[in-house]
Amino acid sequence: MKTIVERLSEEFGKNREHVQNVVTLLDEGNTVPFIARYRKEMHGAMDDQTIRSIADRLAYLRNLDARKEEVKKSVEGQGKLTPELSEAIDLASTLAEVEDLYRPFKPKRRTRATIAKEKGLEPLADLLFAQGDCPLPEEAAKEYVDPEKGVNTVEEALAGANDIIAERISDDAEIRKDLKSLIIRCGDIKSVSAKKDAEDTVYRNYYSFTSEVCRIQGHQVLAIDRGEREGILKVAVDINRDVAVGLVKRHVVTKPKGNATAFVEAACEDAYDRLIFPSVEREMRGMLTDAACEGAIGQFALNLKPLLMQRPVKGFVTMGLDPGYRMGCKVAVVDGTGKVLDTAVVYPTHGERQRQDCIAKLGYMIRKHGVKHIAIGNGTASRETEAMTVDLIASLGHGMGVSYMIVNEAGASVYSASKLGAEEFPEYDVNLRSAISIARRLQDPLAELVKIDPKSIGVGQYQHDMPEKRLSETLAGVVEDCVNAVGVDVNTASAPLLARVSGLNAGTAANVVKYREENGSFLNRKQILKVPKLGAKAFEQCAGFLRVPESEEVLDNTAVHPESYGAAKQLLTLCGYSEADVKTGNLSELRDRLKAYSVERAAKTCGVGVPTLNDIVTELMKPGRDPRDELPAPVLRTDVLEIKDLKPGMELKGTVRNVIDFGAFVDIGVHQDGLVHISQITNRFIRHPSEVLSVGDVVTVWVKEVDEKKGRISLTMRKDKLKQD
């Protein structure tokens, strides 16, 4: 039997030694970001996502092996573990297969079959089920009529034997396995309206819906599941009964023309209708839901990463506007580092006079603080606030150079009402905290969004229907990878941001902030070891991801790990440079000199592997670099569009806000995002929009269709398709 490492190696197509090293590193308590970044030689330079997937699969396989041992121990305790059953359990590749094999031996609640056994009818069931040389069932049953045991007639005896045989058939793992395979190949999922006169709801596409089980899409599964929970839909798995029952009979009937054949065939039908199909239907529905949830969670993770990694608009005084009707528009001005300079509440939707007062007041704040960018939340009253902002910018004159951007405010209210929000801004009320968060989201999306539960950020699909633990683990992994890919300034980072750094947690992150407040800024990386409860192991994991710009050691402001400082300095010497050249950025010929010297030779001389050496070179050439700066800049606007301004064929620039199974939603500067259906994304076949698009991508689109009444905008990225239509 293959080991777990061998199975992982085959499944992921990776070198067995590299996989073994990943498993060992994980077992030693190393984090995924640390392993991915600083142990590349050990795992063949796998990326963080692959290592995380291996970690997830490792946990599943270990859990599977543990369950196999539990099952074998339980069956052995009953004295029923045969070599064949033990081998079948060992060869099972999923938990479902193990449970099917265990089903006949699993302690059951009191069933019709157990009641029949209590009445002494199991020998009769055995006789008939064997289908050998036996009398007719009616004759055989006469011996088991015993009123004292509750068996008053032949019919009652046969009914009890039928119940025992039916349960035995239902517990057959091979039958269940083959039936599931049949449903996957030939079955359908059907949904209908639960009411005769159904209203027009979001589930209208599923009022009379049929899809092959093997072809149904994840978003369709999640939609009909939710519709069923809300009592709007009735859902069922449909399979040709004759074919399915025939499959069961082929497994069970051994004597086509025996005295007991008809009786056993009837028991097969009873087992199928009463026990097997309802159970397998639930399992198949559960399997489809699990697969759909995994797909949705994976898509959520794909969307979350580019959202967190959006290019920041750093160093500019920014005004955040949290729109609203009754409570007004909350305003916050923050400086280039995110420090709050000013706040206000204005009422641009309460009438023309109030609107003009708003423009005057915000214009004064912009001039006073030198505001360059305005971030507008995309919630209630966003469209009216955007229109007011355009007039505000016009009143300032083009010389001011002020621009605005609509910011996804999902989760801002959650943060502002949270304990963290109250601790960070105790002097401001809940509404103003939202405006501060919106302004900071434009300045540094990652630093601000880590304060919010990823599920509340709004780039998922049916995220509230997902398994809570699994979704949280996956999204936490994405946030961790993003934070560590960018790196964190240990002297300015908030506790929530520090808590996402490899090797740190909420407690040690709070200790870092407390130490900083009590002792002043960290002067070098080594000083981090003085933080209470941050030991050598935690330092090893976090050091390379924490930046100390104030340090005299230039490498402290790079992703070079302290364990490789000696190698980095030796590399500089080999190539004729000094540490002073790193500070001045005078390393433009470093790669050429290294190539001339030989990368392999230099790696050997410096005592590191080639992947680590290449990472060191990248960091030396751009110390303190932010990988997000290489991404496309966000679209900042100075004018406004309304849905009524849109015309078919109009060309627009937009930002991808969400990628889902059937397309992508794009912000084109109108209050309502437009949908680019998967068929409109590219002229080549794609299985999923994520093959082409990511959240945050800036794309060119054309208006295909506008339904102003329903607020729907249909877009295309295929100009050729537009001409055909």
Image (tube, rainbow, N blue to C red):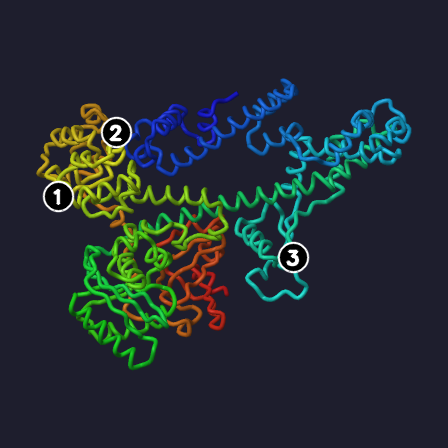
Furthest-top residue in this view: 83
The numbered mark, 2 or 1, whose residue comes first in the sequence reads 1
**Image coordinates for residue 76, horizontal then vertical, percent:** 61, 20
Q: Quadrant of residue 192?
A: bottom right
Q: Is residue 142 above or below residue 630?
A: above
Tags 2 and 1 in contact by the CB under 8 Å rule? no
Q: CA distance from mark 2 to mark 1?
A: 30 Å
Q: Position of residue 656 (x, y in %)?
A: 38, 57
Q: Are marks 3 and 1 in contact (CB under 8 Å)?
A: no
Up-down: is 376 above or below 563?
A: below
Query: What residue is shown with label 3?
Result: 192
Q: Secondary structure at mark 3?
A: strand
Counting residues from the N terminus, which is met first, the one under dot 3 or under dot 2? Answer: 3
Crowding near pointer 3: few (<14 within 10 Å), some, many (20+)? many
What amino acid type is highlighted by mark number 1? Glu
Q: Nearer the viewer, residue 659 or 380?
A: 380
